[in-house]
Amino acid sequence: MPLIPKGSFGHVNQDYIARKERWVQKMAGKKLDRKAVGGRLPPGQHEVKDFPVLDIGLHPEVPLEAWTLHIHGHVENPVKLSWADFMDLPQFTDVSDFHCVTTWSQFEMEWQGVAFFTIAELVKPKPEAKHIFFKSHDGYSTNNPVQTCLDEDVLIAHSWNGRRLTKKHGGPARVIIPKRYAWKGAKFIREIVFLDRDILGFWELRGYSNTADPWSDDRFAESKSPWITTWRTRQDDITLTSPVLKVNGLRVFRNTTSANRRFGSHSLNHPLGIATRIPCGLPTEASKFPPSIATKPA
């Protein structure tokens, strides 16, 4: 089955075809025209040259011999790739700009890895697959529409500027989605799930934008109070209870969960079983849980 998303009224998505044609040209070694640097800085951003490190504070040790990438969900051909399998796929090199929601951007980042078009052609998403959920070795998660990931410059990168990605920058492999704020590309990638519905990830649950478009300064969700919570403290742990509510327009269900304080965080139940971490030391009673409580995403 050809991987061609449909547009309105069943017509072939012309934008998708244009994006795939640009990717094919890049795979063939053709350099495409790029904007002048002066026109590449999104609103509210400033340029840096030192590739700052921002994450949720965990840097998992993942030996290459133990690394796997499980790609499944609404696909015809689910796979679990070893590192050797991953490196045997067609390799892709691309130069793009990198935009962090904390207001810095770095230009001319050269990435090497496997294009998301290659991943999609390998697993063959079913027609109902509209969204993608990424899971990481550090417990992080994020979500994107399939359409966002099927673009000329999206890839699973293993190298940056000709060198293997270090642990602090998300190695062995991380997702790169240049046209979105960087938190939409998961570091330490271990699993890609194609879904028929949208499920919020780590930062999206905490009030950050579900679309994350740098060019529209799209940093935060519309809701001013995404979380209405009650905190109850005990000697060794913290328990969170929350009502049914909506974040980024999606329904989040009531849950109660706890974890030991000595780990500095506790887990929140998630529809896909993701352990989403929230810093401890919060007030006993909190009327809302704003994004600023946790370290900001990239």
Image (spheres, rainbow, N blue to C red):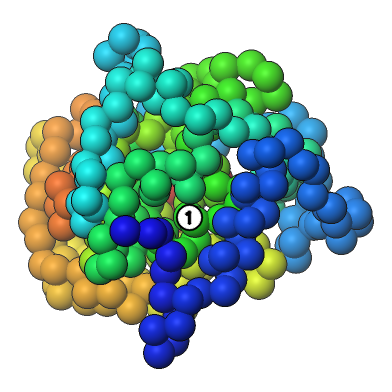
Give the quarter of the figure containing the N terminus: bottom left
Q: Is residue 62 above or below residue 94?
A: above
Q: Residue 289 location in percent, x, y?
A: 34, 62
Question: Which residue of the protein is positioned furthest toward the front in this rendering?
Answer: 1
Quadrant location of residue 31?
Answer: top right
Q: Is residue 4 above or below residue 92?
A: below
Residue at 88% in and 51% down: 37
Q: Is residue 49 above or below residue 158?
A: below
Residue at 30% in and 45% down: 123
- Side of 233 relative to 62 (left or right): left
Give the quarter of the figure containing the C terminus: top right
Q: Is residue 84 above or below residue 221?
A: above
Q: Residue 186 location in percent, x, y?
A: 43, 41
Question: Which residue of the protein is positioned furthest toward the bottom in this rendering?
Answer: 9
Residue nearest the viewer, comparing 209 with 240: 209
Let me know if residue 221 appears in the view: yes
Assess disc 1: are there few (<14), some (14-19) or many (≥20) residues with their C-alpha within 10 Å of its C-alpha.
many
- Side of 238 relative to 218 (left or right): left
Residue kind at label 1, given as amino acid type: Cys
Let me know if residue 169 appears in the view: no
